[in-house]
């Protein structure tokens, strides 16, 4: 049996780190990491990991990274985790009302949550198409569900996640014809104890604030159990379907 490879991009998030830590415990798995910050992966446990540090996630950079991955002799990628995501930063907070909507902030969120993941998908598909079954997970969010939006607010974040879901839907239709070995999964991790969600912890029930290690284990199990079916699955941390 050929050793399978897991690729994690945007690998500096807490969930991405937890996924990486789970993967390296599997004897039959190799690991490739792509991140702007690779400090976490200097630990000795990642000594056999291929770590690729990038300055940005512009299309030119992504193309270059994918080409370098394609030159690896041991390449047999069976899982890809695209962990990019932005909810807030020093200049951006989720909008509580329409008057707070900003075109600049929206474009920044759209770039991080929608455009960047789709650029990875665009560049990786030619490399991954073939006989090897490959499951590609893109981090989305339940708030990207149009049907599930009963609270309003968070205009830019909701829209950016709804947009990536629609793009993944379209991609799945194409891949069902041209790359049947690829399965797309749009994943909602729940509220994880991380810098991304920290400002909003007070509104989250204790039993719904998850450790990143828990989410990573749940996701890996979901990926293992999800069949190739020519469709994109929009699921939560329990593996339950979310309405589009």
Image (tube, rainbow, N blue to C red):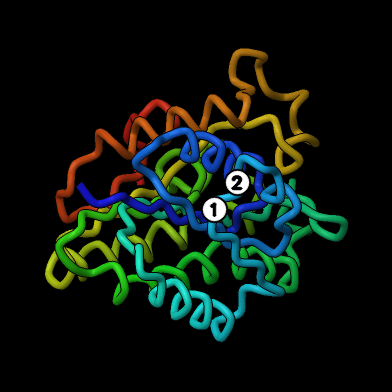
Marks 1/2 in contact by CB < 8 Å: the verdict is yes
Q: Which residue corresponds to the image point at 24% horizontal and 39% vertical from the top-left?
A: 226
Q: Left or right: 80 with respect to 154?
A: left
Q: Would residue 160 be visible to someone looking at this image?
A: no
Above or below residue 171? Residue 142 is: above
Q: Left or right: 171 with respect to 32?
A: left
Going by the picture, which residue comes out furthest to the top? 207
Q: Left or right: 197 with respect to 29?
A: right
- Residue 185 is situated, as x and y percent measured from the top left of the image, at 34, 49
Q: CA distance from mark 1 to mark 2?
A: 5 Å
Q: Which residue corresponds to the image point at 31% horizontal and 73% vertical from the top-left?
A: 127
| Front residue of 8 and 195 | 8
- Residue 43 is situated, as x and y percent measured from the top left of the image, at 70, 44
Q: Secondary structure at mark 1?
A: loop
Q: Residues within 10 Å of mark 2 (few under 14, many from 20)?
A: some
Q: Which residue corresponds to the image point at 58% horizontal and 36% vertical from the top-left?
A: 18
Which residue position holds label 1?
49
Q: Secondary structure at mark 2?
A: helix
Above or below residue 197? Residue 69 is: below
Q: Which residue corresponds to the image point at 54% horizontal and 43% vertical from the top-left?
A: 20
Going by the picture, which residue comes out furthest to the right? 90
Q: Left or right: 64 with respect to 180?
A: right
Give the quarter of the image for residue 179. bottom left
Which residue position holds label 2?
46
| Front residue of 141 and 129 | 129
């Amino acid at each position: 049996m050929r050793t399978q490879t897991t690729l994690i991009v945007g690998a500096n998030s807490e969930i991405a780190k937890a996924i990486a830590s789970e993967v390296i415990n599997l004897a039959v798995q190799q690991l490739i990491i792509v991140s702007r910050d690779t400090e976490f992966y200097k630990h000795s446990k990642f000594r056999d990991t291929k770590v690729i540090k990038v300055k940005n996630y512009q299309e030119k950079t992504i193309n270059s990274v994918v080409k370098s991955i394609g030159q690896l002799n041991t390449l047999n990628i069976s899982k890809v985790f695209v962990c990019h995501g932005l909810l807030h930063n020093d200049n951006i907070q989720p909008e509580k009302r329409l008057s707070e909507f900003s075109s600049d902030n929206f474009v920044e969120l759209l770039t991080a949550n929608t455009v960047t993941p789709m650029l990875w998908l665009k560049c990786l598909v030619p490399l991954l198409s073939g006989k090897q079954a490959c499951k590609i997970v893109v981090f989305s969010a339940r708030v990207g569900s149009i049907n599930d939006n009963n609270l309003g607010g968070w205009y830019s974040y909701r829209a950016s996640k709804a947009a990536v879901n629609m793009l993944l839907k379209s991609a799945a239709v194409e891949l069902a014809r041209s790359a049947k070995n690829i399965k797309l999964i749009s994943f909602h991790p729940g509220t994880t104890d991380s810098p991304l969600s920290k400002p909003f912890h007070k509104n989250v029930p204790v039993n719904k604030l998850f450790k990143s290690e828990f989410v990573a284990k749940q996701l890996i199990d979901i990926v293992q159990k999800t069949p190739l079916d020519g469709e994109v699955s929009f699921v939560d941390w329990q593996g339950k379907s979310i309405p589009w």
